[in-house]
Image (cartoon, rainbow, N blue to C red):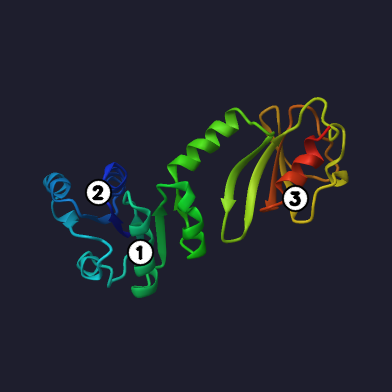
Amino acid sequence: MYVVVAGGGKVGANLTRSLIAMGHEVTLIEQRRDRFERLEQELEHQVQHGDATEMWVLERAGLARPPDIVIAATGDDEDNIVICQLAKERYGVPKVIARVNDPRNQPHFDLLGISPTVCATLNLLALVEHEVPEHGLVHLLDLRQEDLAVVEVQIEPNSPSVGARIADLRLPEGAQVISVVRGGQARLGDGALRLEPGDQVLAVLKRGVEEEVRRALLRR
């Protein structure tokens, strides 16, 4: 697999090293001269100097082939958007992955159809939320292109859903229980299964109905 990585900071450089160790062909593009020179000593011909938002730099890196994946991992969200757009629309790259530095910029990536994206801040927040859930519902995965989310809800001892069959839950339209984790064992969301305190309910739902799901499972 041929991969082009834009951005030779810690994220881009470590990603490049890992991909090379896995046996993939990789070209890393880095704009800063000092950083490029350090990487060149290590990676030699696999790193190129230049601004990855400029077409001639991308073409020199081999986007005319095109590569299998372009990863925009710079520290600037605007640059990552431009790199992904050029890769998809100008060069027909089949797969792009973008780093999102500021979570507030995620809607811009979504609007332009740049997916998948990786945001370290949001990933860390999700882990914190999972360990200390504030409202009983934790987002595990957002499927932005499909406008869906996978969430986890832990059933409390005094929840009205305790003892209820999954088929009898008053879930909103667009929400469905897919699995129940009990005692470390996952069970499919069979409609006849009755919920017990401590159950971790995994559900897939349309974005925007989270509060209705919370009410159905947890509201006293």
Residue designated by label 3: 176
Residue designated by label 2: 8
Give x and y (percent) for residue 128: 54, 31
Q: Nearer the viewer, mark 3 or mark 2?
A: 2
Mark pair 2, 1: CA separation:
17 Å
Q: Residue at x 80, y 30 (%)?
A: 196
Q: Residue at x 29, y 55 (%)?
A: 5
Mark 3 secondary-structure assignment: strand
Which amino acid type is shown beneath numbered disc 2? Gly
Of the residues under marks 3 and 2, which one precedes in the sequence?
A: 2
Answer above or below: position of 18 versus 65.
above
Using the image, tell me which numbered label, if any, was put on residue 52: none
Mark 2 secondary-structure assignment: loop
In the shown orientation, is residue 175 left or right of residue 151?
Answer: right
Which amino acid type is shown beneath numbered disc 1? Val
Q: Nearer the viewer, mark 3 or mark 1?
A: 1
Residue designated by label 1: 82
User: Closest to the observer: 209 or 92?
Assistant: 209
Q: Quadrant of the N terminus?
A: bottom left
| Residue 68 appears in the picture as rendered | no
Give x and y (percent) for residue 118: 44, 49
Q: Residue at x 26, y 61 (%)?
A: 52
Image quadrant of residue 61? bottom left
Q: Quadrant of the C terminus?
A: top right
Of the residues under marks 2 and 1, which one precedes in the sequence?
A: 2
Image quadrant of residue 31? bottom left
Mark pair 3, 2: CA separation:
42 Å
Give x and y (percent) for residue 204: 68, 50
Circles 2, 1 touching at the beta carbon (< 8 Å)? no
